[in-house]
Amino acid sequence: MIKVSILVPVYGVERVIATCAETLFAQTYEELEYIFVDDCTPDHSIEVLQQVLQKYPERQRQVKILHHEKNRGVGAARLTAILAATGEFVMHVDSDDWLPTNAVERLVNKQQLTDADIVDGGYMEKYADGTERKVTPWHGSKESYLKLLLAQNTLSHQLWARLIRRSLHMDYHILTMEGVNQADDYSVVPRLIWVARRSWIDDVVSYYRIEQMGMFKEGITPRHVGSLLKANQTIADFIVNHDKENHYAWATKVGLLKIYVQAFRAGVSVNQLSVRLPAYSNSGLLSFARLLLRIPFGDRLVRYLYLLLKGIIREKIYHSKQKEQE
């Protein structure tokens, strides 16, 4: 039986962490390690967690609660958890979400059948108004999956709802980064997919809490723009260094159009875009985008260009996939 480490950053979640912890400790899979990272939370999240743990004495020896001396952000909290884990596989869990009690068991069963490095599961988006939406993993080749991820806002790039071989994080140094708290998932997942053998199940293995219907917005605050740029530069640099035959360059550049718009609207000047996000900045597409951003309403034009090109990539991939299935 393989050991699975469940990694949970904790900050400001005293209202919801009990639900998360209950479902983690009640897992049907036995060989677990739980690592909670207290990112200097200002509330009673850790006390609530410890109260829940008292109900599960059989799990207490499996639990580690690590503490940051100051708030360092989710990127650092995830990193602390990864480095402390001892399981062959890890699962990242956000402390405001929750899991079906057989989630780990289902993912491990698929891993044992396929010997995959990553097993993706389905998840359920749970909205504050009571509505919900099931999201299933991408069924298809690594190449098509990566292109859709790099083009952005086409497939989810979340770290959670996946079983991940820990050696991918460690051997390839694919780790979250301190200071990258916006797009921290995106800074890691495409790199993991690049080096991994992947399989999937459609079963729901996570419930994703969405408090506000408008959470999926195009905008980003000036406070988080540096994090967004660093995350995307990390991925773009990785593609530049590893994509020797340029299979993924176009999708990456198209995805960067979206980041251009977000950064520009958050106050990053056109001149600073190529400095703070230098990957592919000399390409014709991104040079043209910067020209557009210098004219009135240019950000709208770049956004329309992004949506058009992303749509073309998406339709081409889905059309090829449909033909393969026929």
Image (spheres, rainbow, N blue to C red):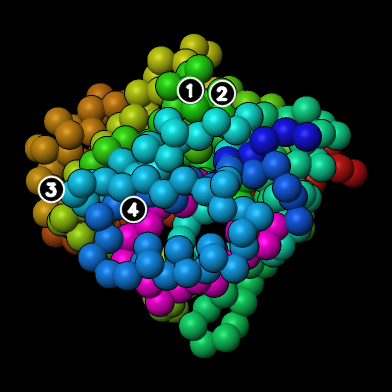
Q: In the rendered view, would you say 74 is above or below 187? A: below
Q: Residue at label 3?
A: 268
Q: Secondary structure at mark 3?
A: loop
Q: Position of residue 206 (x, y in %)?
A: 62, 60
Q: Residue at x 37, y 37 (%)?
A: 80
Q: Secondary structure at mark 2?
A: helix
Q: Residue at label 2?
A: 167
Q: Are marks 2 and 1 in contact (CB under 8 Å)?
A: yes
Q: Residue at label 4?
A: 38
Three-letter amino acid code of the residue under disc 1 = Met
Q: Residue at label 1?
A: 170
The image quadrant of residue 112 is top right
Q: Position of residue 32 (x, y in %)?
A: 64, 44
Q: Residue at x 53, y 63 (%)?
A: 53
Q: Residue at x 26, y 46 (%)?
A: 68
Q: Is residue 131 left or right of residue 139?
A: left
- The label nearer to you, 3 versus 4, is 4
Three-letter amino acid code of the residue under disc 3 = Val
Q: In this orientation, does residue 205 appear?
A: no
- Quadrant where the C terminus sits is top right
Q: Are marks 3 and 4 in contact (CB under 8 Å)?
A: no
Q: In this orientation, does residue 281 appear?
A: yes
Structural crowding at the residue carrying mark 1, measured as other residues with C-alpha within 10 Å and reported as few (<14), some (14–19) or many (≥20): few
Q: Nearer the viewer, residue 262 or 110?
A: 110
Three-letter amino acid code of the residue under disc 2 = Ser
Q: Is residue 194 left or right of residue 179?
A: right
Q: CA distance from mark 2 to mark 4?
A: 24 Å
The range drawn in magenta is 7-27
Structural crowding at the residue carrying mark 4, measured as other residues with C-alpha within 10 Å and reported as few (<14), some (14–19) or many (≥20): many
